Amino acid sequence: MKVGSMRDGRVGFMIAGVQKAGTSSLFSYLARHPDLQGPTVKETHFFDDETGVDWAKPDYERFHGLFAAADGDNRIAFEATPISIFWPNALERIAKYNPDMRLILIFRDPIERAWSHWRMEIDRGTDNVPFGFAIRQGRWRLRDLATNHPAWRIYSYVERGFYGRQIDRLLGLFDRQNVLFLRSNDLKRDPAATLASVATFLELRPFPPGKPIIQHVGESDFGRVSDVDFRYLKSLYAEDLEDFAKTSGIRVDDWSTWHSMNYEGTS
């Protein structure tokens, strides 16, 4: 089944997660392909919009307006909003919009992801507590709040790393053949091979050659995750990470969270 384009009135695929796992770099690589068309902004945040969209009768023209396709443009339209896999109702809204939507998910070690997320929020000034507090008592800031409360966009350092439960929900809504799981480690080490798998998944001609892309958000020097914090998070993620590995079929054996020995911290 061919991936849809704006010619048939719908966006064909999305990078739906996860935050701080290389989605910006992946988006930039995809934007190089002559058969793909990205939006005017990388993250449209349409399907996780809780205030600007009437979800009983959504206006998709506002969403489509972010894709400036001329008549006869047969490129596949795509976007990248990494909160989509995590945000309540976003996947359900996407499935209603396009049941045949293809979804690309790129994953990173959950402890490294949490650390990078916290660093970003500190840089932005949206949080001001130490990492150890943020992943323990700081989680209380989400207690008793609806899961679509704006606070969940910021303080969900730990919660976003429970990948297993998130992809279980995803695969309950979309056929497995419509989903591609990738690893940030692979995109960084061998982007050509990762892009080849994307081309196969989307039934595209090969990606054109180009220089490697590395993009970072949150550049301040905060040292590294302490051993105490690492072991605390490892214990939280252990069961979910095992489920995630089995369900996704992707490698996690080179992730620090998978190991109990020889941890040296994240940089």
Image (spheres, helix red, strand yellow):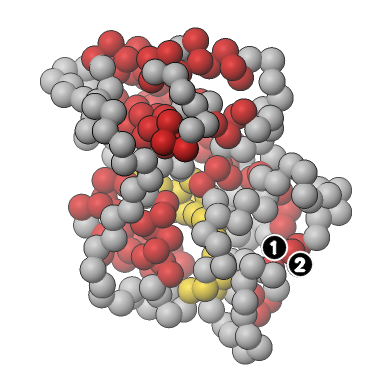
Q: Is residue 221 visible?
A: yes
Extreme-right residue of the structure: 57
Quarter of the picture holding the C terminus: top left
Q: Which residue is mark 2?
A: 61
Extreme-left residue of the structure: 262
Pinpoint residue 206: horizontal percent, then vertical percent: 33, 75
Position of 139 relative to 33 (above/below) = above
Local secondary structure at mark 2: helix
For the residues labelled 2 and 1, say whether their Cβ atoms are less than 8 Å apart: yes
User: Alpha-carbon distance for marks 2 and 1?
Assistant: 5 Å
Pinpoint residue 192: horizontal percent, then vertical percent: 25, 64
Q: Residue at x 81, y 48 (%)?
A: 55
Q: Residue at x 51, y 15 (%)?
A: 138
Q: Nearer the viewer, residue 154 or 205?
A: 154
Q: Which residue is mark 1?
A: 63
Position of 214 relative to 209 (above/below) = above
Q: Residues within 10 Å of mark 2 (few under 14, many from 20)?
A: few
Pinpoint residue 3: horizontal percent, then vertical percent: 55, 70
Residue 114 horizontal side relative to residue 80, left or right? left
Position of 30 relative to 220 (above/below) = below
Q: Residue at x 63, y 85 (%)?
A: 70
Q: Amino acid at mark 2?
A: Glu
